Image (cartoon, rainbow, N blue to C red):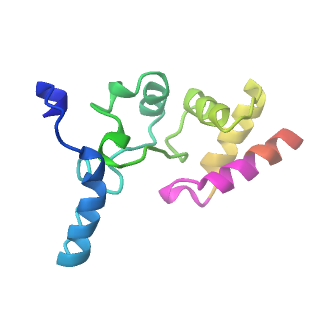
Amino acid sequence: MRIQYGIDRYDTTKLTELSAMVNEFSGLKPAVNKAIVGEHAFSHESGIHVCAILEEPRTYELFSPEMVGGNRHLIVGKHTGMKALKGIVGNMGYDLSKEELGTLLDRIKNCTETKHGISPSKLESMVIETKKH
């Protein structure tokens, strides 16, 4: 209602929390890709999606995840592209050269842990290791 009609009289920041409560009491868990409250509702891995999200989130998200009590997750994995990786690594506070980014991207694509994406701590250790070489 807020986005479509400008009606701003409801606290929508508790929707994710409310959904978790319904799940707890009913035993019915929403699909991971369920819009708004699904575990992966605001998750992006595809290189083009991540690039767009970093530049202008509304490209793929009608509203911010915080509006419904959620969080955005940028997944680093086999579908991550160079530009997306540069943005993610930059947001972590690292500045890698084009060559270092290429090396890191190769390591990510060859990593056996990419089925569900690489954890932020694993990514950081890979970035540090890449910077050393």
Position of 127 with respect to 15 (left or right) is right
Question: Quarter of the image holding residue 83?
Answer: top right
Q: Is residue 77 magenta?
A: no
Residue closer to the observer: 43 or 133: 43
Residue 31 appears in the figure: no
Position of 55 with respect to 69 (left or right) is right
Compared to residue 52, the image places residue 26 above or below, namely below
Location of the N terminus by quadrant is top left
Question: Quarter of the image holding residue 93?
Answer: top right
Q: Residue furthest top?
A: 55
Residue 98 appears in the figure: yes
Residue closer to the observer: 102 or 40: 40
The residues colored magenta run: 112-126
Q: How far across and how far down the image is residue 54, in percent?
A: 49, 28
Compared to residue 86, the image places residue 16 above or below, namely below
Q: Is residue 121 magenta?
A: yes
Residue at the location (66% across, 36% down)?
Answer: 89
Residue at the location (75% across, 44% down)?
Answer: 127
Location of the C terminus by quadrant is top right
Question: Quarter of the image holding residue 103?
Answer: top right
Q: How many marks?
A: 0
Q: Is the magenta stretch mostly helix, strand or loop?
A: helix
Position of 120 with respect to 35 (left or right) is right
Q: How far across and how far down the image is residue 82, in percent?
A: 60, 30
Residue closer to the observer: 132 or 56: 56
Residue at the location (67% across, 56% down)?
Answer: 122
Residue closer to the observer: 27 or 76: 27
Residue at the location (24% across, 61% down)?
Answer: 19
Q: How far across and how far down the image is residue 59, in percent?
A: 34, 25
Q: Which residue lies furthest to the front in this view?
A: 9
